[in-house]
């Protein structure tokens, strides 16, 4: 069954998209055009999906829109993390796995076929009650410092992070205990190779990790774009702050390194300012090349489904990336 928090998130996302569509109905064509709807009789059945929390809200929107076009198609969409999505896909337990990381060679060797469908990113998180918050906002945190916090563990206090030895508060590092694309990407950015390289207290699931950091003034963690920023207001979720990443290494937080709204974060992901990793593609995986109903759905995502990404706070594929993905499906 879906977790309640994820269900609420997806409902809010869908509602936001509906309101946006209503407001522009006079000048824009609706997502479900008459020509598309006329083809709905040709498609029927159930598509099962599981995997990354990062793509879950968008997948529920895609599923709802596709069902409007094809009323005889039903969906069973579950979260659980990228690891679960890949395990379920390779086991034949689901039709599609949502994978928020690169597909591994050993997974491809077992039959995993994949295409990218969107782009987003993982962001660091601290509590809004962090004892060094003012200095973090002013100076940012360098990639090397993240390595010393998350991977080697050699930096122990918040005073060490901001260069104030008098600040003795010990850093509490949180990571994901479940197999997660977000953890995999954050490890790569921080100087590790795999999720297990992150040293910290494991928390199961993305919503729980965000909540844990919010409640711990000394906590630090990471999370996906659409878990960091509120789905309706676009502001940071209550209790957390995204500390600036000192991307250019100049020892201060520049305007394009400090993000307080989703629009600001999406802009730097889209224009390439935000480093990759932790910016990454969101992928859909199947066991073998998809066919039939599953293929039709993925092709729709790579065409009309791309038009829904911006409204939901994701970055669409470029025209070249979109064409490459569609060609791969042939």
Image (cartoon, grey):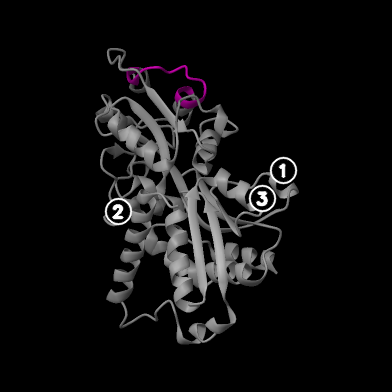
For the record, the magenta segment spans: 148-159
Q: Between tags 1 and 2, which lies in front?
A: 1
Q: Is residue 291 left or right of residue 284?
A: right
Q: Nearer the viewer, residue 78 or 123?
A: 78
Q: Find the distance from the CA under tag 3 to the CA under tag 1.
A: 14 Å
* Residue at 45% over, 83% down: 33
Disc 3 secondary structure class: helix
Q: Find the distance from the CA under tag 1 to the CA under tag 2.
A: 38 Å
Q: Find the distance from the CA under tag 2 to the CA under tag 3.
A: 37 Å
Residue 283, horizontal then vertical, whole percent: 57, 54
Does residue 64 sit above or below 190 in this rendering?
below
Q: Quadrant of residue 47?
A: bottom right
Disc 1 secondary structure class: helix
Which label sits on residue 91? 3
- Residue 154 drawn in magenta: yes
- Residue 251 drawn in magenta: no
Residue behind mark 2:
234
Which label sits on residue 106? 1
């Amino acid at each position: 069954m879906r977790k309640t928090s994820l269900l609420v998130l997806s409902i809010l996302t869908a509602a936001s998209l509906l309101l946006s569509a209503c407001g522009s109905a006079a000048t824009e064509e609706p997502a479900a055009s008459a020509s598309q709807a006329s083809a709905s009789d040709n498609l029927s059945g159930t598509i099962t999906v599981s995997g990354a929390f990062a793509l879950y809200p968008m997948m529920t929107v895609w599923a709802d829109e596709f069902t409007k076009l094809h009323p005889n198609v039903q969906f069973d969409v579950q979260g659980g993390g990228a690891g679960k999505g890949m395990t379920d896909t390779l086991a034949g337990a689901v039709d599609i796995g949502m994978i928020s990381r690169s597909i591994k060679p050993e997974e491809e060797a077992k039959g995993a076929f994949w295409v990218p469908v969107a782009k987003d990113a993982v962001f660091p998180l601290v509590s809004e009650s962090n004892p060094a918050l003012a200095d973090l906002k002013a100076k940012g945190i360098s990639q090397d410092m993240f390595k010393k916090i998350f991977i080697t563990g050699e930096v122990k206090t918040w005073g060490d992070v901001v260069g104030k030895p008098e600040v003795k508060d010990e850093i509490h590092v949180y990571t994901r205990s479940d197999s997660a694309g977000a953890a995999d990407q954050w490890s790569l950015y921080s100087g590790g190779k795999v999720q297990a390289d992150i040293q910290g207290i494991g928390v199961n699931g993305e919503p729980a990790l965000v909540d844990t950091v919010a409640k711990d003034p000394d906590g630090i963690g990471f999370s996906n774009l659409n878990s960091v920023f509120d789905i309706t207001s676009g502001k940071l979720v209550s209790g957390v702050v995204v500390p600036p990443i000192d991307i250019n290494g100049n020892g201060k937080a520049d305007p394009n390194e400090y993000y307080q709204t989703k629009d600001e974060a999406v802009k730097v992901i889209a224009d390439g300012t935000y480093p990759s990793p932790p910016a990454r593609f969101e992928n859909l995986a199947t066991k073998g090349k998809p066919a039939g109903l599953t293929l039709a759905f993925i092709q729709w995502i790579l065409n009309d489904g791309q038009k829904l990404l911006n409204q939901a706070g994701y970055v669409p594929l470029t025209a070249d990336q979109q064409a490459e993905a569609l060609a791969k499906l042939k």
